[in-house]
Image (cartoon, grey):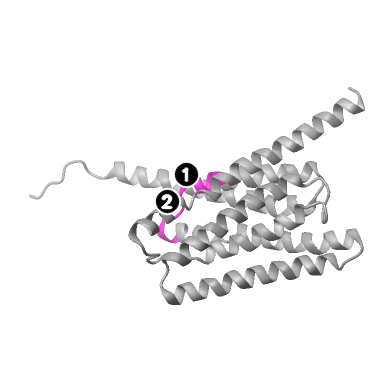
Amino acid sequence: MSMFAAYSIYTVAKDAAGVAGNIFAFGLFVSPIPTFRRIIRNGSTEFFSGLPYVYSLINCLICMWYGTPLISPDNLLVTTVNSIGAIFQFVYIIIFMIYAEKEKKVRMLGLLLAVLGIFASIIVGSLQIADDVTRRLFVGSLSCASLISMFASPLFIIKLVIQTKSVEFMPFHLSLSTFLMSTSFFLYGLLNDDPFIYTPNGIGTILAIVQLILYFYYENKSRADASAEPLVVSYT
């Protein structure tokens, strides 16, 4: 096999992993839609929190900036997926603010402005760094830390599943989508030799596998317990 053919296969494999990651991430981005349909239908945010969308927005913005040519070359697919994600999160936040009570609305507006201010500071600060390697290290470290914190957030749900022995609060499709997305970008990062991508997504893949294992364990256990119940109850 010639060097050109090997390079072509390598490039196709890397791009395929990145495109797959974009597709699976889209599934995660649209997952809150049923929640917002309910909010719009009821005209109230009820007991829902807007914080997850604020956290997701800052994560998408930082990762989007990292993927631009100004910070890291050949990471366009990182920019595209996080640009789409940022748009979704921004729309969710706006809808939440429209239907939230005054106190929640003011708090969400403050958080949104804080996120935009932090992101602007990161852009300005990173552009002040003349050395390309140092600039990439700075933004890449922020991106990596942000992704790890996002992937670590399900640890609370994992703990809840173990305590309650129920998968009610851990939807299967979300765990599966997280696994597929993080695995795709883990491979993309490896093929692109980018530790700021493969490190957090490797952690995300492991945590997603744990979620899937717990889901099947407790789901099967629940079915086994249900089938073990007597079909006829005697009152004599």
Q: Is residue 172 magenta?
A: yes
User: Is 13 displayed left or right of 162 in the figure?
Assistant: right
**How dense is the environment of label 1, judged by Cα within 10 Å: few (below 14), some, or many (20 and up)?**
few
Residue 154 seen by the camera: no
Inspect the image, locate mark 1, and give the three-letter code of the amino acid beneath it: Phe
Vertical comparison of 97 with 41: above or below: below
Inspect the image, locate mark 2, and give the three-letter code of the amino acid beneath it: Pro
Q: Give how far across and how far down residue 230 sits, in percent.
A: 22, 43
* Quarter holding residue 152: bottom right
Earlier along the polypeptide chain: callout 1 or callout 2? 2
User: Is 42 displayed left or right of 29 in the figure?
Assistant: left
Q: Which residue is mark 2?
A: 34
**Residue drawn at point x = 70 percent, y = 66 percent:** 119
Quarter the N terminus occupies: top right
Q: Give how far across and how far down residue 167 sits, in percent.
A: 43, 52
User: Is 24 displayed left or right of 3 in the figure?
Assistant: left
Residue 172 seen by the camera: yes
Q: Which residue is mark 1?
A: 216
**Residue drawn at point x = 82 percent, y = 56 percent:** 71
Label 1 secondary element: helix
Residue range (magenta): 163-177
Q: Is residue 183 magenta?
A: no
Closer-to-camera residue (156/35): 35
